[in-house]
Amino acid sequence: MKNTTLCYIERGDEWLLMHRVKKENDLNRDKWIGLGGKLEENESPEECLLREVREESGLTLTRWRYRGIVTFVSDIWEGEYMHLFTADGFEGKIGECDEGTLEWISKEKFKSLPQWEGDKLFLDLLDTDSPFFSMKLCYEGDKLTFASLNGKRIK
C-alpha cells in the first residue's frame, strides 16, 4: 500500500481545490480534490505535505493540522493510506500546476462538483472540526461499496 497526503487549504468559507484535468490515466481524472501526493523515501507525512503543496501550488504552508488517516481499497487501483490535513495559514502566490487547474471554491459549491463519494464523508468531518479519525473506504470502480469510521461501519 502506498502512503500519500491530501490537504484542504482553507480561506474563509473556501477550499483551494485542484480540478484534475491535465494528466492521462489519472485515477482522479476530472474530479475536484485537495493538494497532495506520494510520500518519498524517508519522508514524514508532514514533510510530504509541505513539499507537495509547494510543488503543486507555489504556496508555503505556515499553519496546518493533521486531521486523520484514510485507508483506500480498490478493485482497480493500488491500496493507499492517505494522511489527511487541513491548513489555514500560507504564504506566497498561487502558480501553475502541471496536474490540474487550481481554484478557490466555496465549500457549498464544492458539494455539487465531481468528486469521490467517500471524499464527501471525510470532508463533512473536516468541516465540522471532528477530532482525529481513521476512515476506511472501499471501491469497486468508481462506486463506494463500504465505509467505516473509527472501526465502525457507516456505509
Image (cartoon, grey):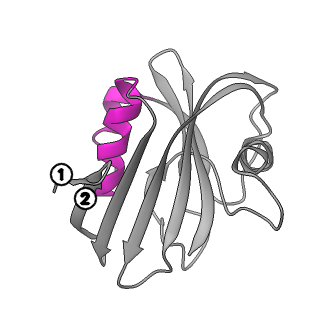
Q: Which mark is residue 18?
A: none
Asked if the magenta segment contains residue 93, the reply would be: no
Q: Decide which of tag 1 and tag 2 comes sooner along the chain.
A: 2
One can see residue 20 in this view: no
Q: Where in the figure is residue 42, as x and y percent of width and height? A: 83, 63
Asked which secondary structure carries label 1, the reply is loop
- Bounds of the magenta span? 106-129
**Quadrant of the image containing the N terminus:** bottom right
Asked which secondary structure carries label 2, the reply is strand
Q: Where in the figure is residue 34, as x and y percent of width and height? A: 54, 45
Front in this rendered view, residue 13 or 104: 13
135 left or right, relative to 52: left
Asked if the magenta segment contains residue 114, the reply would be: yes
Look at label 1 and name its amino acid: Ile
Q: Quadrant of residue 88?
A: top right
The answer to whether the residue labelled 1 contacts the one labelled 2, judged by CB atoms less than 8 Å apart, is: yes
Q: Residue furthest bottom?
A: 76
**Quadrant of the image containing the C terminus:** bottom left
The residue at which mark 2 appears reads as: 147
The residue at which mark 1 appears reads as: 154
Q: Marks 1 and 2, Cα distance to the nearest angstrom?
A: 6 Å
